[in-house]
Amino acid sequence: MAKPKRIILGGFGNIGRQLARRLGGGADPDLSIAAIVARDKDKAARAAEELGLDVPIITSAEAPGFDAILVECSTYDGFRDVVEPTLRAGGHVVAVSVGALAKNLDLIDIAQDSDAVLQIAGGTLPGIDIIRAAAEDEIDEVLLTSHINPASFAHEPYVKEHGIDLDAAAAGPVEVFEGSAREAAGYFPRHFNVAVTLGLAGIGLDRTRVRIRADGTLPGARHRLTVKARAVELDMESQNFPSPDNNRTSMVVALSILAALRHDTATLRIGS
């Protein structure tokens, strides 16, 4: 029987703890947690103990010393500090805070130079596989329309600077932004990992268009993806539901990480 694949949790917030609950204590025969990267080691150790998880709490600089995949589940601000040492050492990183990559695109070059793997799990968006397939030929247009809970935007400078009335979103969609995926990631770096993932998978951050609406009538984020290409046209919509631990995070985020990790170990692999 094959040994479980070892992972390092690169952060121990909402996503990291969701993964710990599913994988901790040898609960999963295919995946095991080898260590946790945390700035506040004492806080992380207490949280790990509460979940019955007995693993080392380490710094990001120590992560390359483990024979394990680093699953980055930190924050926009901590993204580079968490992933860079492992990428420079030629390791394998699965990234969650992908919005930060738009401001740190040199990490892709670092990964290439060191023969590392920088993997983005695409399970939070509809149609990623078909976009990657269409990108092998010609894509004319990619448009992402996202309806987001207004509470997620309450403290965003862009909303305040543009005088957007989020209270009105309680009754229906309120226009917040329209522009490129690069601009969306710049203005809303903590919310638009999906825009960066989409741009990198298809026709780039500048050609990928994003519309953002605040909408208090939905149970979670709703994404509609429209693609026009020479090989295919696509119109898909997904309704995400919030995590029970943090309603600003979609439940499917942690599940997409698990799916990506399982794909690498599976005998039967579905997806391009």
Image: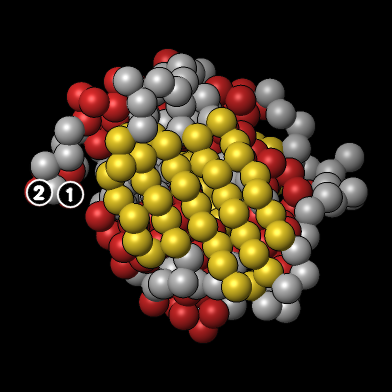
Q: Which residue is mark 1?
A: 158
The residue lying toward the viewer, choosing from 61 and 195, is 195
Tell me where residue 97 appears, x and y as whole percent. Answer: 41, 50
Residue plotted at (69% across, 41% down): 259
Q: Identify which amino acid the numbered label 2 is placed on.
A: Glu
Residue type (three-letter) at the residue carrying disc 1: Tyr
Residue 144 locus on image (x, y percent): 50, 52
Residue 125, percent across and down? 58, 46
Element class at badge 2: helix
Residue 102 at least partly seen: yes
Q: CB of mark 1 within 8 Å of CB of mark 2?
A: yes
Q: Is residue 16 left or right of residue 118?
A: left
Would you place residue 106 above or below residue 61 in this image? Answer: below
For label 1, the SS is helix
Q: Which residue is mark 2?
A: 161
Separation (CA) of disc 1 from disc 2: 5 Å
